[in-house]
Image (cartoon, grey):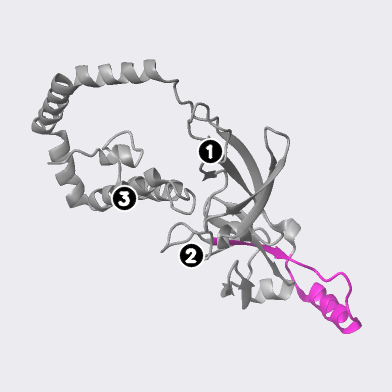
Amino acid sequence: MIYKDYYKILELETSRVTIEEIKTAYRQAAKKYHPDVNIGDKLAEERIKDINEAYRVLSTPSSKRKYDRIWNSKFAKKQEKSKESIVDMFFGNITRKINNENTDSKKEQIKGENIETQINVTLEDAYYGREKKISLRTVEGKMKTFAVKVPRGILNGEKIRLIGQGKQGKNGGKNGDLFIKINIEDGQKFKLKGYDLYTDLLLTPWEAALGTRVEIKTIDDKAKVYIPQGIQSGEKIKIPNKGYIKNRETRGDLIAEVKIMVPKKLEENEKQEFEKLMKISKFNPRDQKI
């Protein structure tokens, strides 16, 4: 019998979601509770097991339909309600009595407050996953340095959690946690939008006019790009699966925006060729309809 609410585990509010929405929710949940982000957190380890289990069941249409039938059936609802009633009947009064005695016999343990901060990382640091060091001033006024492992493929605005590095608990309570918000800075070469990377593709006038193949630098490699004849400044060329990390198997796209560059200084023979072209060409951009 199924007792786990897989939609709730993936932080989905309804079962009326598409497989793609389930995959997106799984990726977000897997990143949120990844061991690298929740070092030493046993609850997070258990949570990631439930997340993987939920994804295995809900990621294919046939198993999702079967799960929905069982979970939404009256029998499952009655079974759950009956189970709760029996537990409350036999153990409810005893549990309340024990809780009251514990409260009376000792002071309540209070968990320390969480602390939030943020750091800026380069696009390359976020893409490759690198260790960063941050320094924070403690309540006592002392500076404390933390080594933070930025998970590979973290998204802009996501947070890293350092367990027990927040404010100190009271009466034996656990310390709070430190949450570090990641701000990904655009670089000179690449800019991040969602999972896609944007870059400039610089072309000479003759490359744009005649068409050619050029080599373009990606964030981790190089790629050959076909330039169609007559391409214009501002047009974009998409290089699939060369963008930012989506998951272990797929990436976003690299979007290259064309910018046609005119030489500032011409050699004499180059100047003569441009003058010939100006005389024989019938092209006038000012006559074009926009």
* Nearest the eye: 174 or 88: 174
Which mark lies nearer to you, 3 or 2?
Answer: 3
Residue 186 in picture, x, y percent from top left: 67, 53
Q: Is residue 65 left or right of residue 198?
A: left
Which mark lies nearer to you, 1 or 3?
Answer: 1
Q: Amino acid at mark 1?
A: Asp
Q: Which residue is mark 2?
A: 241
Report how far apart the C-alphas of labels 3 and 2 lie in the structure.
Answer: 29 Å
Q: Give the quadrant of residue 225.
A: bottom right
Which residue range is magenta in the image? 254-283
Question: Which circle marks residue 49 in the picture?
Answer: 3
- Please tell me which of labels 2 and 1 falls first in the chain: 1
* Nearest the eye: 210 or 111: 111
Q: Give the crowd class for mark 2: few <14, some 14-19, many >=20 residues within 10 Å.
A: some
- Tell me the SS state at disc 3: helix
Whether residue 113 is situated above or below residue 98 in the rendered picture: below
Residue 126 in the magenta stretch? The answer is no
Residue 288 in picture, x, y percent from top left: 69, 57
Judge whether residue 126 can be spotted in this image: yes
For image coordinates 18% across by 50% down, the residue present is 63
Q: Amino acid at mark 2?
A: Asn
Quarter of the picture containing the N terminus is top left
Q: Is residue 113 left or right of residue 43?
A: right
For image coordinates 10% across by 27% down, the residue present is 78
* Nearest the eye: 36 or 68: 36
Q: Is residue 34 left or right of residue 180?
A: left
Report how far apart the C-alphas of labels 2 and 1 lie in the structure.
Answer: 36 Å
Q: Is residue 169 left or right of residue 215?
A: left
Residue 256 in the magenta stretch? The answer is yes
Q: Amino acid at mark 3?
A: Lys
Residue 232 in picture, x, y percent from top left: 66, 63
